[in-house]
Image: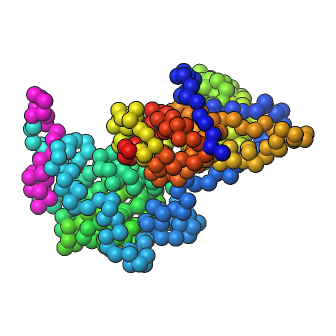
Amino acid sequence: MNASIVEAPPDPDRSTPVGPPLHTAPRSPARTRPAPVPGPDVVSSGGPSFFLSRCVGDVEEFASQYWGRRPLVTRASDRGRGDDLFADVLSLGAVDEFLANGARLPAVRMVADGSPLASTRFCSPTRLGGRQLDDVVDPVKVIARLAEGSTLVLQSLHRTISPVAAFVTRLQDEISHPVQANAYLTPPTAAGLAEHADLHDVLAVQLHGSKRWWVEGLGDVTMKPGDVLYVPRGARHRAETATETSLHLTIGIIRVTRRQVIERILRAGPESLDAPLPLGYRHRSHRDQLEQSLDAALDDVLDLIGSTDLSTIVEHEQSRRLARPPRAGRLASFVHVDELDADAVIQWVAPEPLTRAVDEVDVRLGHWDGPRGHDHWSPQPERITVHLGDRTLTLPTTALEALRTLSDGRPVRVGDLPGLDEPSRVVLARRLVREAACVVERLG
C-alpha cells in the first residue's frame, strides 16, 4: 500500500551544517585503540566502475598492480574500441567553441619550451558591459602562437565545459578521490612543458593526433587517439609531438592519503599539542626541557590514537564532501518547482551520499525485530538522514523506496516514484528540488 507524506512547515533544523564531528572515546590508560564496531557495507552508487574502466581497462588489476605504484598504458585497440572512445568528453570542435565564446584568464594559458607566455601575446582588449577587459582570449592570436610552436593549455575544464564536468563528476564518484581536468593542444614538433613530476596522479587521455612521452619507470611510449597513460604521483615525465598536432586531456587525481587522515585526527586532538616548544630549545643546555616537552606531546598523541574509535573515523572520511563541478539545472529547477507534477522528470544530483543513507536504513531495518522483539530489540528507524556535505537532509522512511530509485542517479518520472501515493510523490519531489538535492530534467 502506498504511504502518504504530509508536507511539514519550514523547519530551521531541516538543513543543518554537516560533517559528522570527529569524536573520540573516553581515554584509556592502556592506550589501546578500541576494536571497530561493525557497520553497514557501503555499496558504490556507480555499481561497476564504468568511467574508470574506460580509462584503464580492468579496474581490479589497475587497483592492485598500478594505482599509486607504477605507470600504465591502456590502448583503445586492446579494449576493442576505436579512436573516438572519448569523443563525447572533449574534441577539437569543443575547444574551438570554447575559445570563440569569450574564454578568459586564467582558464586559458599558453606555454613554450616550459615557460608561460605573456597574456598580451594571446589576449586582446575587449569591452563588456561598458568595461574594457584585458584578459579575453583572442583565437586569432592563439593560432599565431600555435604556429610558432607554443602549447595551448585549458585549465580546470571540469568547471567550464559540461561534458568534461560530467565525466569528471562520475569518475570522482567512482574512485572517491578528488578529480580535476586540463587539456593541452600542442602543434607539431613542439614540447609544451619541460620534464617534471606532478604532485597528483595523472590519466592522460589522447584525443587527437599523437604524442610521444617519456615516463620514469616506463620509458618511451607513443600515444594515439583513445589511448590512456597513467602516471603516478612523483614519476618524472615529459612529452612532445612529432608530425601531428596533438590534443590530450589530463585528468588529475588528487590522492586522499592515510597521512591526511591521521593529520585530521591530530587536528581534532587536545590543545596541548599546540603549545610552543620551550624558549631557546635549540641550545644544548635546553635539551632536557625539549625532550620533556616532546615526550609529553607524544603521550598525548598516543592517548588520542589509543582512544579514537575507528568506526567513527571511517564514517567521517566517507561523509567528507569532495569538491565537485557545479551541476547545471539547479537554478532553473528552483524557479519552476511549483510547476512540478507527476509527469515531471527529476534526477538526484549526487547519488553516492543517498545510496549510503539508503543502505544504512536497510541494515537497521534488517536488524529490527518488530514490536514484540526480545532482548536485542531495536526500534524501527523512522527517518533517513542524507549527508550532503554542507548540510543534512532528513526524510521519513516512508520515502525509502522512492529514494532507493533516485539513488541510481538516473532520471525518474515523479509519478513513477514507488512506495508513495501521487500527492506525496509530488510533495517529495518539490522538497528535493528546493533542497537542491535534485534537478528537474523535464517538466510534465
Q: Where is 36 relative to 134, above or below?
A: below
Membership of 130 in magenta stretch: yes
Give the image location of residue 346, x and y in percent.
Answer: 44, 45
Q: Nearer the viewer, residue 15 or 23?
A: 15
Give the image location of residue 321, x and y in percent.
Answer: 51, 40
Q: Nearer the viewer, residue 200 or 284?
A: 200
Asked whether residue 80 is in view, the answer is yes
Give the residue displayed 29% in from the left and 50% down from the top.
Answer: 161
Residue 204, quarter of the rendered image: bottom left
Q: Nearer the viewer, residue 196 or 133?
A: 133
Give the residue displayed 12% in from the left and 33% down from the top.
Answer: 128
Locate the C terminus by quadrant: top left
Q: Where is 248 relative to 108, above or below?
A: below
Membership of 265 in magenta stretch: no
Give the image location of residue 125, x and y in percent.
Answer: 9, 38
Give the residue displayed 33% in from the left and 54% down from the top.
Answer: 163
State left or right for residue 380 relative to residue 333: right
Locate the N terminus by quadrant: top right
Outermost residue, right direction?
Answer: 375
Q: Nearer the viewer, residue 235 or 404?
A: 404
State left or right for residue 387 relative to residue 193: right
Q: Which residues are magenta?
A: 127-147
Give the residue displayed 59% in from the left and 34% down from the top.
Answer: 5
Give the image location of residue 443, x and y in percent.
Answer: 37, 43
Count of marks placed on residues: 0
